[in-house]
Image: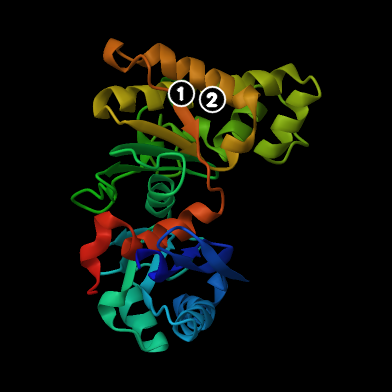
Amino acid sequence: MAAHRTAVGIDLGGTKIAAALIFADGTISSRASLPTPAANGPEAVLDAIAELAAPQLAAALAAGTPALGVGIGAAGVIDPATARVLSATDHLPGWAGTDLRAGLGTRLGVEPHRIQAVNDVHAHALGEGWLGAAAGSDSVLLAAFGTGIGGSLLLHGVPVYGARQVGGHLGHVPCAEATGLPCPCGATGHLEAVASGPGLHALYLRRGGDPTATDARAVFARATDGDVIAAAAIHTAATAAGRALGGLANALDPEAVIVSGGLADAGEPWWGPLRAAFAAELIGPLASLAPQAAALGADAALAGAASLFLAPAHSTLVSA
């Protein structure tokens, strides 16, 4: 029965690696996690992934439901055809060039085609599109607002990776509110410079906010306490996010728009201006479209990674 098909999902971030055994009906039977040994290099990270995945594979086998494979949602730009890391940030030193398929296949004794990998934000979108807020939607635009701004466009359940595998870098679309501001990518005027967590924090400080506020979370706390500079900075950042998403929706016409990431947990002071700016940007035929909050939380990337084997759109990846 389809419900008894299983796969291991891995969510690899710069600080934590999570793993779970997931059934084709979306049931998660077990979870485990470890700190990411990023400072020890890519071989140590592969060792940690294997340490988490091996018991999951063994549990599936013991239960009579051998896992179809190990799916990974990994930080960095990932080539889904080869499961190789094309580029990565300094959060994972030396990670660029890592061959996930070869490294984990050897460690786990798994055939190469049973190791699949995508970027972690694509994994989040796959999870939400399979089991979460966008389940049943044929086209999905997901935007994740946190330390950075990432995204993914799903068509018929498959991410649009782009010709160079960098599709989904929504943080690097032009943004009027960020004019002249430096972006982490080295350019200026990009959405991430004002609408990411660090961008929002920097905006607050530039406007004369309390210098003892150390991050975006502190800015939201000060807004709750009546800090008008904090409230205005949040409004500007959320408005920029909503305008960008509305413009992207006009261009792409997705069936669903999903918003996730740490800032999406900030409540109405952030969501209110985002929704208003999004709606104001839409052309007539899209007037009924509204952004929705992601539904799966931390489980989204795990489910999305496992969906590389379990969801109908990816059924050709593995043999029966």
Instruction: Tell me, yes or no, if residue 219 can be seen here.
Output: yes
User: Which quadrant of the view contains residue 7?
Assistant: bottom left
User: Which quadrant of the view contains residue 316?
Assistant: bottom left
In the picture provided, is 59 more to the left or to the right than 201?
A: left
Q: How crowded is mark 2: few (under 14 residues within 10 Å), some or many (20 or more)?
A: many
Q: Residues within 10 Å of mark 1 (few under 14, many from 20)?
A: many
Residue type marked 1: Gly
Identify residue for label 2: 238
Residue placed furthest toward the right: 225
Of the 4 image quadrants, the one containing the N terminus is bottom left
Q: Which of 257 and 212 is in front in this view?
A: 257
Residue name at image x 57 percent, y 70 percent: 30
Q: Are marks 2 and 1 in contact (CB under 8 Å)?
A: yes
Instruction: Tell me, yes or no, if residue 175 can be seen here.
Output: no
Q: Where is residue 58 in the image (x, y as percent from the top left)?
A: 48, 85
Identify residue for label 1: 242
Q: Position of residue 48 (x, y in %)?
A: 53, 78
Q: Nearer the viewer, residue 34 or 14?
A: 34
In the picture provided, is 266 more to the left or to the right than 318?
A: right
Real-space CA distance between mark 2 and mark 1, rounded to the nearest whole angstrom = 6 Å
Residue name at image x 44 percent, y 26 percent: 180
